[in-house]
Image: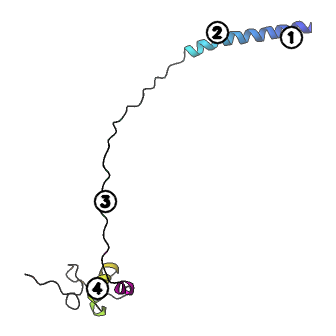
Amino acid sequence: MNILKISGIVFLACGAYLLFDYLILPWVIANQPQHIVKPAEETPVRFTRPIKTQTALPIQTSTSIQSNNRCDGRTHCSQMTSCSEAHFFLANCPNTEMDGDNDGIPCEHQWCQPPPHS
């Protein structure tokens, strides 16, 4: 009797497998909604020339003046010793009071004479 029960279980298992594999699974696959994926639109490729950039040239200064100058708290023309030193302080140091008319020329009366008007 044991062999009959085992045979019946094996027969039912094989039948269930065949039913699922040949009838149910193909039906499920056939009835799934189809996802339509459109290919991405191709964007035209534009070839451009590289942009030329300009680099700033360094200001020519003498090495002795450039190496000696540093912001040391001086803010007035009376504390300067040359026009180039006054330009360095005006351009690089905070709270300077050397360009009263804001024309970019420091210490016009002591060190840096503006060009004569013609």
By secondary structure, the bulk of the magenta-drawn segment is best described as loop
Q: Earlier along the polypeptide chain: callout 3 or callout 4?
A: 3
Quadrant where the C terminus is found in the figure: bottom left
Please give the label number shown on residue 53: 3
> To which residue does mark 4 refer?
84
Q: Earlier along the polypeptide chain: callout 4 or callout 2?
A: 2
Q: Secondary structure at mark 2?
A: helix
Front residue of 102/38: it is 38
Q: CA distance from mark 1 to mark 3?
A: 86 Å
Q: Earlier along the polypeptide chain: callout 4 or callout 1?
A: 1
Q: Which residues are magenta?
A: 56-73
Residue 67 counted in the magenta span: yes
Please give the label number shown on residue 51: none
Amino acid on which disc 4 is placed: Ser
Q: Nearer the viewer, mark 3 or mark 4?
A: 3
Amino acid on which disc 1 is placed: Ile
Q: CA distance from mark 2 to mark 3?
A: 71 Å
Q: Nearer the viewer, mark 4 or mark 1?
A: 4
Q: CA distance from mark 3 to mark 4?
A: 30 Å
Q: CA distance from mark 2 to mark 1?
A: 25 Å
Quadrant where the N terminus is found in the figure: top right
Q: Earlier along the polypeptide chain: callout 2 or callout 3?
A: 2
Amino acid on which disc 3 is placed: Thr
- Location of residue 17 by image quarter: top right
